Image (spheres, rainbow, N blue to C red):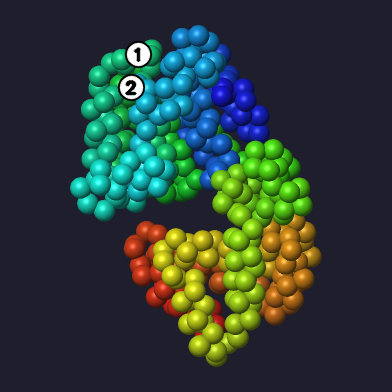
Amino acid sequence: MSLDEVKEQPQAIDALTRALKAGQVHHAWLFQGPDGVGKELTALGLAQAMTCPVKPNVGCGTCASCQKIAKRNHPDVTWVMPEEEFVSRGLAARSDFAGTPSRDIRIEQIRKLQERLAFRALEAPYKLALIVTAHAMNPPAQNALLKTLEEPPKDTILVLISSATDKLLPTIRSRCAKASFGPLSPQFIAQHLMAKKKVEPALAEQIAAMSAGSLSRALELNPKALAHRKELIEQFEALVPGDARGWLALAETMGADRQTAEDALEILQTWNHDVALAQVGGTGLVNVDLQALAVSAGAKVSHANLHRRTVLIDEARNAITQRNGAARLQLERMLVEMFAS
Ligand SMILES: [Zn+2]
């Protein structure tokens, strides 16, 4: 794997390869764009390019140094992410952490990184820090990192990877060179599913259309998940004002646990977008198989109400993910707000 191989993100790759060729790689980068479109892969490629002894500034992908980076065990490349992310990726065990693994990147993690960066590189000409889901840094962590961005240690490159850059301090954003990543094309995703996952062409196309340009999301969408999505949307559209029993039943299904709730809210938000698109006669719906339902749903709801739903879904999602709100309770509240008035 080298930077050249990330063909689907020409804008970001051009910016990086130009900097590499000129020997002027900025000390801090912000890789911005949706989840699952290659930001982390590109960060890995950049780390290889900066440290590879075989093909300097390019990365060969096969030498010992490049392989260590790919396996996340190069001593000069430090990965920072929320503890929970380490656990969910199998890079750490739950028992490795004193308390419940954190969903934030905490100031202690940034301090540890800073201690590491204060020493010189061990094997490579550079030290790299790759901060995955950088927006998960809580405010004290962001403030601590700001110091490193203002007075970067020698031979250090920081890469902040984020799909929600609005949650980063403006002072952090302004100190980073930017590389922007866009959604991947449905054709690329469908091809990938067929070639690498042996998915049937028709199903691959449907999944690609529903993935919103995110390969990671596409890989999570199996036939069972697709059926579940359809059921959820149909159940949501069957809700009527005044039928409290219906809302509560849906909140119970959607709110079984936090992950289920987050997934369900994601589905509903995408659906909302589809309904809005159907209202103006647009095409390119994410839920391609539910075009007719989107049209009839769009005829039943006002534009203002649709907008309100979007806001309510975002509020519920924030309450569940950021404030540890009880999933089912938040969903009940959201549905009551949508349908009681
Ligand atoms: Zn190499």
Check the image and name the residue furthest to the front: 198
- Give amino acid for label 2: Pro
Residue 218: image x %, image y %?
Answer: 61, 49
Check the image and name the residue furthest to the top: 54
Mark 1 packing: few (<14 Cα in 10 Å), some, or many (20+)? few
Residue 310: image x %, image y %?
Answer: 56, 67
Q: Nearer the viewer, residue 263 or 161?
A: 263
Rendering quarter of residue 267: bottom right
What mark, if any, has residue 123 been given in the picture?
Answer: 1
Q: Nearer the viewer, residue 87 or 152?
A: 87
Which quarter of the image is occupied by the N terminus?
A: top right
- What residue is rendered at 31% in x and 15% in y? 122
Above or below for 264 versus 199: below
Residue 92: image x %, image y %?
Answer: 33, 41
- Side (left or right) of 85 relative to 94: right
- The residues bearing labels 1 and 2 have C-alpha atoms spaced at a distance of 7 Å
- Give amino acid for label 1: Glu
- Side (left or right) of 127 relative to 223: left
What mark, if any, has residue 75 been given in the picture?
Answer: 2
Q: Mark 2 and mark 1 in contact (Cβ < 8 Å)?
A: yes
Residue 127: image x %, image y %?
Answer: 36, 21
Above or below for 142 versus 20: below
- What residue is rendered at 52% in x and 65% in y? 265
What mark, if any, has residue 156 been given in the picture?
Answer: none
- Side (left or right) of 185 relative to 48: right
Residue 96 in view, yes or no: yes
Secondary structure beneath label 2:
loop
- What residue is rendered at 58% in x and 87% in y? 241
Mark 2 packing: few (<14 Cα in 10 Å), some, or many (20+)? some
Q: Nearer the viewer, residue 40 or 146?
A: 40
Q: Nearer the viewer, residue 203 or 101?
A: 203
